[in-house]
Amino acid sequence: MRPPILDPLFAPVSTLPGIGPKIAKLVSGLVGGQPDRDATVSDLLFHIPHNLIDRRHQPGIAYSESGDIVTLDVTIGRHQAPPRNSKAPYKIPAHDETGEISFVFFHPRRDWLEKTFPEGERRIVSGKVEWFNDRPQMVHPDYSLKPEEAAEMPSIEPVYPLTAGLASKTLQKAMRAALERVPNLPEWLNDAHLRQTGWPDFRDALQTLHMPKERQDMEPQSIYMQRLAYDELLASQLALAMVRANMRLLGGTARKPDGALQQSVIDALPFHLTDSQSNAIREINEDLAEPTRMLRLLQGDVGSGKTVVALAALAQVIETGAQGGLMAPTEILARQHYASMTPLCEKAGIRLALMTGKDSQKQRRLLQERLDAGEVDLVVGTHALFQGSVSFKNLGMVVVDEQHRFGVHQRLALSGKGQGVDVLVMTATPIPRTLVLTCFGDMDVSRLTEKPAGRKPIRTVSVSLDRLDEIISRVGAAISEGQKVYWVCPLVEESEKIDLAAVEDRHRVLEHALRQRISLVHGRMGADEKDSAMSAFKNGETKVLVATTVIEVGVDVPDATIIVIEHAERFGLAQLHQLRGRVGRGDKPSSCVLLYKGPLGETAGARLNIMRETNDGFLIAEEDLKLRGGGEILGTRQSGTPGFRIARADEHADLMEVARDDSRLILEMDPELKSERGVALRCLLYLFGRDAAIRLLRAG
């Protein structure tokens, strides 16, 4: 049960003044409530300002710099209304002792302007000054007040990220009302820590961030920001530690076969294992031999041979008479894993099956019967594998591919399919150490750092979109020599329709220019359409595949040697690196062309430079963290990463370590969270949406 003291913070935002159903929907989209419910007051409060406006700057008209926000004490002149039906703006001249300025309005209500800017009277006006033809003007000032009302204008005003249709004033009014609802919560940090850091309590910190007195108050290293970032990190680390403790409690099975099956899988490989593959297999075998459950993250750059390690680990478990499951995020990937594992499993004598959402009821029923009878050793599938109804005779180990599309909840659901199920998670997204702590604080980590022999490095170039025709003709030349090409177009949620049109348009242009059929894959297509387009490309019926980023993860076409990424400036580094990993999978030299639209901003330019300079995914991930901050690095926040609202992996990495140690200590001293501090920590977990972990206390 949620502690009643938190109830005011879990009321829907629509209970705040000025927020009706329509605005509530906009606010929910902005501050990230759950998709199926309105945002709450606490969701709104964790939407923190990213900048501030200082209205104390009063330089006088003549000394106002273009682009500055200033506050002016002026006398209003005669209004200059445009002629009827004209599109010209409405102008109001004004002056102080240093000079003259025009206030400019488009489509205004004249009666409102005459009341707000009365001719001949003094007004305190604040807004952004722009110099135009050597004359200052202010378009739609933010405030116009009588001198005696000037105190009502906030001298420092926070600036929030907004969304179309939501006015800044509406959000600020709601925010002020939300702050009044914050109760005095019990303190969940220990006294010694608070004294040592000098941090304020939770409520004061939140209040100051939303109503800062100075710019420093909002800096990542201010005591207010640090306090809230630490609270958020502690909630996350405590929840992860509780999941881990719960897995330990449920116990595991010590699996110590003689390793003959694993060896026969390794012997069936057409190549030798790299040193890091051998190390990873050794670490996994050591985990499996322990009586506690394995929870290990296998990190390896694109093409470093993670699937082979996974199959070797599964063989070790299957040899003890248990079953294994491998779960992939998409059907394309599941089929691909199945295809690449089939020859190895046949040689080693492992009975392999595929389960996808497309199976007919009869196929599903027959497979289920074989699983129950123990006639299948290893099943590969999508999330369909772990829907409620699928059961196993004796599930011993699960491998999850691309963890960041798969959160803690699903991990718990999975483990419930058997007794003491061991879990191995694979990701091709190289994750910097700080983020490994954030997202996988409850896991041990193995890293694959080498590429298998025979892989050629990928040559990367960046080219301006102005040279599109030249690139298209080069693609034409490459496919006439029998090469295959990916052409990736960006997809940004806000403008999905426009981008979809852009993908389809690019597809038409290329078909026309290259005079041949070209495959097209995007997120709005049905699974059948996607599959047939992909297999046409794979089988060589088509030589070019135009796609949105649906091909980012795991698509394997070894004879594809060129990838063109259009609008590369719109992508993050980790994503560019993932996409680049679609080529260079065979023994032919490959190249990646980053098409950008100039002029490039500083960050985008830095990103493209890093891509040209290195193929090392871990180096790229560290750079990405510096350029973008942590929330973005594992794809967008929706993809199940602990999308931090306040803490930033790049700025608060040191706090992360402290939070991890603190959470371990808490659970050693008070595993049930029953002490006074424990009860306060339950509030913290609910507040930051980590309450699923509290249910484990009851379940465990």
Image (spheres, rainbow, N blue to C red):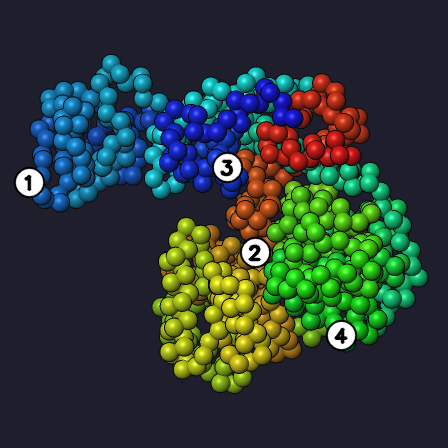
Q: Can residue 79 be seen from the camera position used here?
A: yes
Amino acid at the residue labelled 2 = Ala
Q: Distance of mark 3 from mark 1, alpha carbons? A: 49 Å
Q: Earlier in the sequence, mark 4 or mark 3?
A: 3
**Which of label 4 and label 1 is nearer to you?**
4
- Quadrant where the N terminus sits is top right
Label pair 3/1, CB-CB below 8 angstroms: no
Amino acid at the residue labelled 1 = Pro
Q: Distance of mark 2 from mark 3, alpha carbons? A: 31 Å
Q: Earlier in the sequence, mark 4 or mark 2?
A: 4
Which residue carries the number 1 mark?
A: 83
Q: Earlier in the sequence, mark 2 or mark 3?
A: 3
Asked if 85 appears above or below 10 in the picture, the reply is below
Which residue carries the number 4 mark?
A: 343
- Quadrant where the C terminus sits is top right
User: Which residue is at the far top?
Assistant: 148
Q: Earlier in the sequence, mark 3 or mark 1?
A: 3
Label pair 4/3, CB-CB below 8 angstroms: no
Which residue carries the number 2 mark?
A: 574
Q: Distance of mark 2 from mark 1, alpha carbons? A: 55 Å
